Amino acid sequence: MEIPEGVTVPGKQTTLDWIVCRLQRGLYDLKQSGRIWNRAWEEFLVGKCNFQRSIVDHAVYYRIGNHQRPLWTIIWVDDVLWIGTAEDIAKAKRELEQRFPLKDLGVAHFFLGMKIIPQPQHQKIILSQVQYIDKILQRFGFQNAYTVSTPMDPGVPLVIQ
């Protein structure tokens, strides 16, 4: 990193002297920015909010909320998806507001390119990637292709040569 113009460094008279800057904070577009951001999330969620990090996916955190119901937090860079009861989510958001600036966008409809379709009457959530699939089909010129349930006859023997 170059010394910003107008900044003087005591004991250094020429621009040929070797000067090193030590960053006190992470900056966008640095290789370590994502790691620094992730570490800040982890320190706060695990250290202060009693979440546990999933061993399967390091972007997923969880804790047991009220009435022994789980609260899941899924983080992708600066996007956060909450899965849990409204009461537990509101409490967790209040805790996070103490450390991070939050912008609540309400109920999630899309996350990481997936459409989220809640079906509370059946106690399930449907995830759909129709937009992604349509984009891929357009990219390769197959948007008007006919659909079939199986691309070939079920009994065709496959041969490897």
Image (spheres, grey):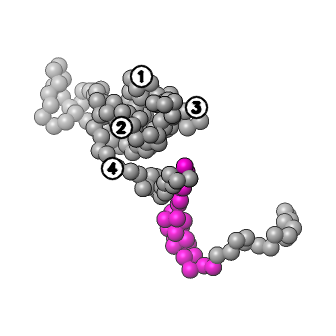
- Between residue 70 and residue 59, name the one nearer to us: 70
Secondary-structure class at tag 3: loop
Query: Residue 90's x, y, as percent?
Result: 35, 37
Q: Quadrant of the C terminus?
A: bottom right
**Which type of secondary structure does the marked residue at label 2 adopt?**
helix
Query: Which comes before the other along the chain, label 4 or label 2?
Result: 2
* Left or right side of 132 for 155: right
Q: Is residue 133 above or below residue 72?
A: below
Q: Residues within 10 Å of mark 1 (few under 14, many from 20)?
A: few
In space, the residues marked 4 and 2 are separated at their CA atoms by: 13 Å
Three-letter amino acid code at the position of disc 4: Leu
Q: Is residue 23 above or below residue 34?
A: above
Question: Which residue does the image show at 43% across and 44% down from the upper left?
Answer: 81
Q: What residue would you read off at disc 4?
A: 105
Q: Is residue 106 visible?
A: yes
CB of mark 4 within 8 Å of CB of mark 2? no
Mark closer to the chain start, 2 or 1: 1
Q: Are marks 2 and 1 in contact (CB under 8 Å)?
A: no
**What's the magenta region?**
123-146
| Residue 8 relative to residue 63: left or right | left
CA distance for labels 2 and 1: 19 Å
Residue linked to disc 3: 55
**Front residue of 124 and 100:** 124
Residue ID for mark 1: 47
Q: Which residue is mark 2?
A: 90
Which amino acid lies under the numbered mark 2 shown in the image of this protein?
Ala
Please tell me which of labels 1 and 3 falls first in the chain: 1
- Residue under the point 15% across and 31% down: 7
- The picture places residue 150, in percent across and down from the top left corner, at 73, 70
Dot 3 amino acid type: Ile
